[in-house]
Amino acid sequence: MLAVPGRAAADGPNGIDDLRAAAHVTHPVHTPSRLDDRGVQFLPGPDVPEPPDVSALSWMVTDMASGKVLAAKDAHRPLPPASTLKALFAVTVLPKFSPAEVHTVSLEDLGGIESGSSLAGLKEDLPYRVADLWHGVFLRSGSDAVHTLAGMNGGWGKTIDDMQETARRLGARDTTVESADGFDTPGQFSSAYDLTLFGRAGLADPDFAEFASTKHAELPEEGGPDAFGIENTNRLLVGSHGVKPYDGLIGVKNGYTTHAGNTLIAAARRDGRTLLVTVMNPQSGSRNAVYEETRALLDWGFEAAPRAAAVGVLPALAHDRGSGVAQPAVHRPRAAVPLHRTAIAARPDTDAPARYWWLLSAAGGVGVIGLAALGTGLGRRRRRPQASAGGESD
Protein backbone atom coordinates (compact mmCIF):
# COMPACT_ATOMS: atom_id res chain seq x y z
CA MET A 1 0.00 0.00 0.00
CA LEU A 2 1.34 3.42 -0.93
CA ALA A 3 2.34 5.62 1.97
CA VAL A 4 1.00 9.10 1.42
CA PRO A 5 2.22 12.03 3.58
CA GLY A 6 -0.27 13.91 5.68
CA ARG A 7 -2.09 16.76 3.98
CA ALA A 8 -1.00 20.31 4.53
CA ALA A 9 -4.42 21.49 5.60
CA ALA A 10 -7.98 20.30 5.69
CA ASP A 11 -10.23 21.09 2.79
CA GLY A 12 -12.14 24.28 3.43
CA PRO A 13 -15.65 24.81 2.19
CA ASN A 14 -14.31 25.97 -1.14
CA GLY A 15 -11.39 23.54 -1.37
CA ILE A 16 -8.91 26.44 -1.23
CA ASP A 17 -7.01 25.75 1.98
CA ASP A 18 -4.85 22.95 0.63
CA LEU A 19 -3.85 24.94 -2.45
CA ARG A 20 -2.86 27.93 -0.34
CA ALA A 21 -0.91 25.80 2.10
CA ALA A 22 0.84 23.94 -0.68
CA ALA A 23 1.92 27.21 -2.24
CA HIS A 24 3.90 28.08 0.88
CA VAL A 25 5.84 24.82 1.05
CA THR A 26 9.44 25.81 0.42
CA HIS A 27 10.71 22.45 -0.84
CA PRO A 28 9.15 19.98 -3.27
CA VAL A 29 7.40 17.04 -1.66
CA HIS A 30 9.04 13.71 -2.51
CA THR A 31 6.91 10.65 -1.94
CA PRO A 32 6.90 7.04 -3.09
CA SER A 33 4.87 6.80 -6.27
CA ARG A 34 3.41 4.19 -8.57
CA LEU A 35 3.36 6.69 -11.42
CA ASP A 36 6.60 5.30 -12.87
CA ASP A 37 4.95 1.90 -13.35
CA ARG A 38 3.42 0.87 -16.64
CA GLY A 39 -0.28 0.26 -17.12
CA VAL A 40 -3.23 1.50 -15.10
CA GLN A 41 -2.33 2.50 -11.53
CA PHE A 42 -5.17 2.42 -9.02
CA LEU A 43 -5.50 1.29 -5.41
CA PRO A 44 -8.75 -0.59 -4.76
CA GLY A 45 -10.59 0.21 -1.56
CA PRO A 46 -13.98 -0.14 0.11
CA ASP A 47 -16.70 1.62 -1.86
CA VAL A 48 -14.18 2.89 -4.41
CA PRO A 49 -15.20 2.05 -8.00
CA GLU A 50 -12.59 1.01 -10.52
CA PRO A 51 -11.60 3.62 -13.11
CA PRO A 52 -13.38 3.38 -16.47
CA ASP A 53 -11.78 1.41 -19.25
CA VAL A 54 -10.71 4.08 -21.72
CA SER A 55 -8.65 3.78 -24.89
CA ALA A 56 -6.19 6.65 -24.36
CA LEU A 57 -2.51 5.74 -24.46
CA SER A 58 -1.94 7.78 -21.31
CA TRP A 59 -4.12 9.58 -18.76
CA MET A 60 -4.14 10.91 -15.22
CA VAL A 61 -6.77 12.03 -12.67
CA THR A 62 -5.60 14.47 -9.97
CA ASP A 63 -7.23 16.25 -7.05
CA MET A 64 -6.18 19.88 -7.49
CA ALA A 65 -6.10 21.02 -3.87
CA SER A 66 -4.21 18.11 -2.37
CA GLY A 67 -2.14 17.12 -5.41
CA LYS A 68 -3.23 13.48 -4.92
CA VAL A 69 -3.15 11.44 -8.11
CA LEU A 70 -6.22 9.22 -7.85
CA ALA A 71 -5.43 7.01 -10.83
CA ALA A 72 -3.27 7.06 -13.93
CA LYS A 73 -2.14 5.07 -16.93
CA ASP A 74 1.44 5.38 -18.16
CA ALA A 75 1.67 8.85 -16.63
CA HIS A 76 5.29 9.38 -17.69
CA ARG A 77 5.00 7.94 -21.19
CA PRO A 78 6.56 10.45 -23.62
CA LEU A 79 4.06 11.40 -26.30
CA PRO A 80 3.59 14.35 -28.67
CA PRO A 81 1.43 16.90 -26.80
CA ALA A 82 -0.07 18.89 -29.70
CA SER A 83 -1.67 22.16 -28.57
CA THR A 84 -1.88 21.17 -24.91
CA LEU A 85 1.73 22.37 -24.91
CA LYS A 86 0.27 25.86 -25.21
CA ALA A 87 -0.56 25.55 -21.51
CA LEU A 88 3.18 25.58 -20.83
CA PHE A 89 3.56 28.48 -23.27
CA ALA A 90 0.94 30.44 -21.31
CA VAL A 91 2.45 29.59 -17.92
CA THR A 92 5.78 30.90 -19.25
CA VAL A 93 4.76 34.03 -21.18
CA LEU A 94 1.43 35.22 -19.76
CA PRO A 95 2.94 36.87 -16.62
CA LYS A 96 5.19 39.14 -18.69
CA PHE A 97 2.61 41.45 -20.26
CA SER A 98 -0.43 43.30 -19.01
CA PRO A 99 -3.65 42.09 -20.67
CA ALA A 100 -4.41 45.75 -21.47
CA GLU A 101 -1.12 46.33 -23.34
CA VAL A 102 -1.61 47.02 -27.05
CA HIS A 103 0.54 45.46 -29.76
CA THR A 104 0.27 46.06 -33.51
CA VAL A 105 0.79 42.80 -35.37
CA SER A 106 3.58 42.92 -37.93
CA LEU A 107 4.47 40.79 -40.92
CA GLU A 108 7.45 39.50 -38.93
CA ASP A 109 5.11 38.39 -36.12
CA LEU A 110 3.20 36.21 -38.58
CA GLY A 111 6.28 34.74 -40.24
CA GLY A 112 7.34 31.11 -39.90
CA ILE A 113 3.88 29.67 -39.22
CA GLU A 114 3.69 26.10 -40.48
CA SER A 115 1.16 25.14 -43.13
CA GLY A 116 -1.78 23.40 -41.52
CA SER A 117 -1.48 25.26 -38.22
CA SER A 118 -4.59 26.48 -36.43
CA LEU A 119 -5.01 30.25 -36.77
CA ALA A 120 -6.87 32.83 -34.73
CA GLY A 121 -7.17 35.15 -37.74
CA LEU A 122 -4.87 38.01 -36.69
CA LYS A 123 -4.33 40.69 -39.32
CA GLU A 124 -1.13 42.52 -40.12
CA ASP A 125 -0.94 46.20 -39.05
CA LEU A 126 -3.99 45.83 -36.78
CA PRO A 127 -3.58 46.73 -33.08
CA TYR A 128 -4.64 44.09 -30.55
CA ARG A 129 -4.68 44.06 -26.79
CA VAL A 130 -2.59 41.31 -25.22
CA ALA A 131 -5.89 39.89 -23.92
CA ASP A 132 -7.02 39.53 -27.55
CA LEU A 133 -3.87 37.57 -28.34
CA TRP A 134 -4.50 35.21 -25.43
CA HIS A 135 -8.06 34.70 -26.58
CA GLY A 136 -6.54 33.65 -29.89
CA VAL A 137 -4.28 31.17 -28.09
CA PHE A 138 -6.84 29.62 -25.76
CA LEU A 139 -10.00 29.70 -27.87
CA ARG A 140 -8.67 29.10 -31.36
CA SER A 141 -5.29 27.53 -30.55
CA GLY A 142 -3.94 30.13 -32.96
CA SER A 143 -0.32 29.74 -33.96
CA ASP A 144 -0.47 33.32 -35.25
CA ALA A 145 -1.23 34.47 -31.70
CA VAL A 146 1.55 32.26 -30.28
CA HIS A 147 4.07 33.60 -32.79
CA THR A 148 3.06 37.19 -32.02
CA LEU A 149 3.41 36.74 -28.26
CA ALA A 150 6.68 34.86 -28.74
CA GLY A 151 7.98 37.79 -30.76
CA MET A 152 7.04 40.13 -27.94
CA ASN A 153 8.90 37.79 -25.58
CA GLY A 154 12.15 38.10 -27.49
CA GLY A 155 11.70 35.62 -30.29
CA TRP A 156 10.76 32.05 -31.14
CA GLY A 157 13.98 30.45 -29.96
CA LYS A 158 14.13 32.36 -26.70
CA THR A 159 10.52 31.48 -25.94
CA ILE A 160 11.19 27.77 -26.52
CA ASP A 161 14.15 27.96 -24.16
CA ASP A 162 12.08 29.82 -21.57
CA MET A 163 9.39 27.14 -21.83
CA GLN A 164 11.96 24.39 -21.33
CA GLU A 165 13.26 26.15 -18.25
CA THR A 166 9.74 26.59 -16.90
CA ALA A 167 9.09 22.89 -17.39
CA ARG A 168 12.28 22.04 -15.53
CA ARG A 169 11.44 24.31 -12.61
CA LEU A 170 7.94 22.85 -12.32
CA GLY A 171 9.40 19.34 -12.15
CA ALA A 172 8.25 18.33 -15.63
CA ARG A 173 11.07 15.99 -16.62
CA ASP A 174 9.34 14.28 -19.54
CA THR A 175 8.96 17.43 -21.65
CA THR A 176 11.20 18.46 -24.52
CA VAL A 177 10.05 21.62 -26.29
CA GLU A 178 10.92 22.08 -29.96
CA SER A 179 7.99 24.25 -31.11
CA ALA A 180 6.26 26.77 -28.86
CA ASP A 181 2.82 26.20 -30.39
CA GLY A 182 2.82 22.39 -30.05
CA PHE A 183 3.12 21.77 -33.80
CA ASP A 184 4.45 18.29 -34.59
CA THR A 185 8.23 18.68 -34.54
CA PRO A 186 10.83 15.89 -34.31
CA GLY A 187 12.01 15.36 -30.75
CA GLN A 188 9.08 17.15 -29.07
CA PHE A 189 7.43 15.20 -26.26
CA SER A 190 5.55 15.64 -23.03
CA SER A 191 3.50 13.34 -20.79
CA ALA A 192 0.20 13.21 -18.96
CA TYR A 193 2.11 13.90 -15.74
CA ASP A 194 3.86 16.99 -17.11
CA LEU A 195 0.74 18.37 -18.79
CA THR A 196 -1.04 18.02 -15.45
CA LEU A 197 1.71 20.10 -13.83
CA PHE A 198 1.28 22.79 -16.49
CA GLY A 199 -2.49 22.86 -16.08
CA ARG A 200 -2.28 23.10 -12.30
CA ALA A 201 0.34 25.85 -12.44
CA GLY A 202 -1.71 27.81 -14.96
CA LEU A 203 -4.96 27.63 -13.01
CA ALA A 204 -3.30 29.30 -10.04
CA ASP A 205 -3.16 32.45 -12.20
CA PRO A 206 -6.61 34.10 -12.43
CA ASP A 207 -5.93 35.41 -15.93
CA PHE A 208 -4.93 31.97 -17.18
CA ALA A 209 -8.10 30.56 -15.60
CA GLU A 210 -10.17 33.31 -17.23
CA PHE A 211 -8.78 32.67 -20.70
CA ALA A 212 -8.95 28.88 -20.33
CA SER A 213 -12.65 28.96 -19.45
CA THR A 214 -13.78 31.62 -21.93
CA LYS A 215 -16.29 30.17 -24.38
CA HIS A 216 -16.77 33.06 -26.80
CA ALA A 217 -14.93 36.30 -27.55
CA GLU A 218 -14.78 39.11 -30.07
CA LEU A 219 -11.43 39.52 -31.82
CA PRO A 220 -10.41 42.23 -31.24
CA GLU A 221 -12.59 42.65 -28.19
CA GLU A 222 -12.84 46.42 -28.74
CA GLY A 223 -14.78 45.73 -31.94
CA GLY A 224 -14.43 47.66 -35.15
CA PRO A 225 -14.89 46.83 -38.83
CA ASP A 226 -12.31 44.02 -38.70
CA ALA A 227 -13.71 42.34 -35.58
CA PHE A 228 -15.28 38.88 -35.66
CA GLY A 229 -16.47 36.35 -33.13
CA ILE A 230 -14.52 33.26 -32.10
CA GLU A 231 -15.60 30.19 -30.12
CA ASN A 232 -13.51 27.91 -27.95
CA THR A 233 -12.64 24.67 -29.76
CA ASN A 234 -12.85 22.70 -26.49
CA ARG A 235 -16.07 20.78 -27.17
CA LEU A 236 -16.42 19.68 -23.55
CA LEU A 237 -16.50 23.34 -22.51
CA VAL A 238 -18.84 24.83 -25.10
CA GLY A 239 -20.88 21.78 -26.15
CA SER A 240 -20.46 21.26 -29.89
CA HIS A 241 -19.98 18.57 -32.55
CA GLY A 242 -22.20 16.17 -30.65
CA VAL A 243 -20.49 16.65 -27.28
CA LYS A 244 -22.57 17.81 -24.32
CA PRO A 245 -20.88 20.46 -22.15
CA TYR A 246 -19.55 19.11 -18.87
CA ASP A 247 -21.14 20.57 -15.75
CA GLY A 248 -18.57 22.54 -13.76
CA LEU A 249 -15.86 22.47 -16.44
CA ILE A 250 -13.23 25.21 -16.06
CA GLY A 251 -11.17 24.60 -19.21
CA VAL A 252 -8.06 24.13 -19.83
CA LYS A 253 -6.68 23.26 -23.29
CA ASN A 254 -7.32 20.80 -26.09
CA GLY A 255 -5.12 19.83 -29.01
CA TYR A 256 -4.79 17.69 -32.09
CA THR A 257 -2.09 16.83 -34.61
CA THR A 258 -1.74 13.85 -36.90
CA HIS A 259 1.11 12.44 -34.81
CA ALA A 260 -0.23 13.32 -31.37
CA GLY A 261 -3.85 12.44 -32.04
CA ASN A 262 -6.27 14.20 -29.68
CA THR A 263 -5.01 15.52 -26.37
CA LEU A 264 -6.82 17.35 -23.58
CA ILE A 265 -6.15 18.96 -20.21
CA ALA A 266 -9.48 19.52 -18.44
CA ALA A 267 -10.35 20.81 -14.96
CA ALA A 268 -13.80 20.72 -13.42
CA ARG A 269 -15.30 21.68 -10.07
CA ARG A 270 -18.19 20.04 -8.23
CA ASP A 271 -19.31 20.11 -4.61
CA GLY A 272 -16.24 21.99 -3.40
CA ARG A 273 -13.73 19.72 -5.16
CA THR A 274 -11.68 20.45 -8.27
CA LEU A 275 -10.25 17.67 -10.40
CA LEU A 276 -7.73 17.88 -13.21
CA VAL A 277 -7.76 15.20 -15.92
CA THR A 278 -5.23 14.81 -18.71
CA VAL A 279 -5.91 12.46 -21.63
CA MET A 280 -3.49 11.72 -24.47
CA ASN A 281 -4.25 10.03 -27.80
CA PRO A 282 -7.37 7.86 -27.46
CA GLN A 283 -7.29 4.82 -29.76
CA SER A 284 -11.01 4.08 -30.09
CA GLY A 285 -11.39 5.86 -33.42
CA SER A 286 -14.35 7.96 -32.26
CA ARG A 287 -14.08 11.60 -33.29
CA ASN A 288 -15.09 12.72 -29.80
CA ALA A 289 -13.17 10.07 -27.86
CA VAL A 290 -10.88 12.51 -26.05
CA TYR A 291 -13.88 14.42 -24.70
CA GLU A 292 -16.01 11.41 -23.78
CA GLU A 293 -13.10 9.60 -22.14
CA THR A 294 -12.27 12.75 -20.18
CA ARG A 295 -15.92 12.97 -19.13
CA ALA A 296 -15.82 9.36 -17.91
CA LEU A 297 -12.63 9.96 -15.94
CA LEU A 298 -14.01 13.15 -14.37
CA ASP A 299 -17.22 11.38 -13.38
CA TRP A 300 -15.21 8.56 -11.86
CA GLY A 301 -12.92 10.99 -10.05
CA PHE A 302 -15.72 12.90 -8.39
CA GLU A 303 -17.28 9.64 -7.23
CA ALA A 304 -14.04 8.05 -6.05
CA ALA A 305 -12.12 11.05 -4.65
CA PRO A 306 -13.58 11.08 -1.11
CA ARG A 307 -12.37 7.51 -0.47
CA ALA A 308 -9.66 6.77 -3.04
CA ALA A 309 -6.05 6.34 -1.95
CA ALA A 310 -3.36 8.15 -3.91
CA VAL A 311 -1.05 6.41 -6.34
CA GLY A 312 1.21 9.47 -6.22
CA VAL A 313 1.33 13.07 -5.06
CA LEU A 314 2.34 16.04 -7.20
CA PRO A 315 5.15 18.31 -5.96
CA ALA A 316 3.81 21.17 -3.89
CA LEU A 317 3.41 24.49 -5.61
CA ALA A 318 5.85 27.12 -4.41
CA HIS A 319 6.10 30.85 -4.96
CA ASP A 320 8.51 32.35 -2.47
CA ARG A 321 12.18 32.98 -3.17
CA GLY A 322 13.20 30.42 -0.57
CA SER A 323 11.72 27.66 -2.71
CA GLY A 324 13.43 25.67 -5.39
CA VAL A 325 11.22 27.35 -8.00
CA ALA A 326 12.49 30.56 -9.54
CA GLN A 327 10.47 33.71 -9.89
CA PRO A 328 9.95 35.60 -13.13
CA ALA A 329 12.35 38.41 -13.77
CA VAL A 330 9.55 40.77 -14.74
CA HIS A 331 6.33 40.99 -12.75
CA ARG A 332 3.38 41.88 -14.91
CA PRO A 333 1.51 45.08 -14.03
CA ARG A 334 -2.14 44.35 -13.43
CA ALA A 335 -4.78 46.02 -15.57
CA ALA A 336 -6.68 48.80 -13.84
CA VAL A 337 -9.92 46.93 -14.54
CA PRO A 338 -9.92 43.20 -13.73
CA LEU A 339 -9.78 41.22 -16.93
CA HIS A 340 -12.82 39.11 -16.10
CA ARG A 341 -15.06 42.17 -15.86
CA THR A 342 -14.79 43.00 -19.56
CA ALA A 343 -14.93 39.35 -20.61
CA ILE A 344 -18.06 38.70 -18.58
CA ALA A 345 -19.71 41.86 -19.85
CA ALA A 346 -19.46 40.45 -23.35
CA ARG A 347 -21.12 37.23 -22.18
CA PRO A 348 -23.91 38.23 -19.75
CA ASP A 349 -25.31 34.71 -19.62
CA THR A 350 -22.07 33.18 -18.33
CA ASP A 351 -21.68 31.67 -14.91
CA ALA A 352 -18.06 32.78 -14.86
CA PRO A 353 -18.06 34.65 -11.51
CA ALA A 354 -19.16 31.57 -9.62
CA ARG A 355 -16.66 29.41 -11.46
CA TYR A 356 -13.72 31.76 -11.02
CA TRP A 357 -14.12 32.80 -7.42
CA TRP A 358 -12.27 29.83 -5.99
CA LEU A 359 -9.49 30.29 -8.54
CA LEU A 360 -9.16 33.99 -7.85
CA SER A 361 -9.12 33.35 -4.12
CA ALA A 362 -6.60 30.57 -4.47
CA ALA A 363 -4.41 32.64 -6.73
CA GLY A 364 -4.37 35.35 -4.10
CA GLY A 365 -2.72 32.87 -1.80
CA VAL A 366 -0.53 31.31 -4.43
CA GLY A 367 0.74 34.45 -6.08
CA VAL A 368 3.10 33.78 -8.95
CA ILE A 369 4.03 30.12 -8.71
CA GLY A 370 7.38 29.47 -10.18
CA LEU A 371 6.87 30.63 -13.71
CA ALA A 372 10.30 30.65 -15.20
CA ALA A 373 10.07 33.71 -17.39
CA LEU A 374 13.81 34.18 -16.91
CA GLY A 375 16.75 34.27 -19.21
CA THR A 376 17.34 30.96 -20.88
CA GLY A 377 20.22 29.25 -19.14
CA LEU A 378 20.21 26.58 -21.85
CA GLY A 379 22.59 28.43 -24.10
CA ARG A 380 20.93 27.67 -27.39
CA ARG A 381 18.35 29.01 -29.79
CA ARG A 382 16.22 26.63 -31.78
CA ARG A 383 15.23 27.20 -35.35
CA ARG A 384 11.71 28.00 -36.33
CA PRO A 385 9.82 24.71 -36.77
CA GLN A 386 10.68 22.78 -39.87
CA ALA A 387 8.20 21.09 -42.15
CA SER A 388 6.54 18.11 -40.55
CA ALA A 389 4.18 15.39 -41.62
CA GLY A 390 1.85 16.44 -38.83
CA GLY A 391 -0.63 19.24 -39.16
CA GLU A 392 -2.26 21.20 -36.37
CA SER A 393 -6.00 21.42 -36.06
CA ASP A 394 -8.24 21.67 -33.01
Image (cartoon, helix red, strand yellow):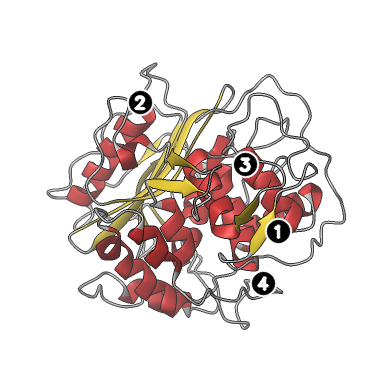
Distance of label 2 from label 3 (alpha carbons): 30 Å
Q: Pointers 2 and 3 in contact (CB under 8 A)?
A: no
Of tags 2 and 3, the one toward the viewer is 3
Label 2 – label 4 distance at C-alpha: 37 Å
Q: Which mark is residue 328?
A: 4
Q: Closer to the N terminus: mark 2 or mark 3?
A: 3
Q: Callout 3, which amino acid?
A: Leu
Spatial CA distance of label 3 from label 4 is 28 Å
Image location of residue 73, percent across then percent down: 41, 38
- Given this view, does label 3 or label 4 mark the residue nearer the observer? 3
List the residue tagged with mark 1: 165
Closer to the camera: disc 3 or disc 1?
3
Question: What residue is rendered at 45% in x and 40% in y?
Answer: 230
Question: Which of disc 4 and disc 2 is earlier in sequence?
Answer: 2
The vertical placement of 314 against 226, above or below, is below
Residue nearer the viewer, 92 or 198? 92
State whether residue 32 is above or below residue 105: below
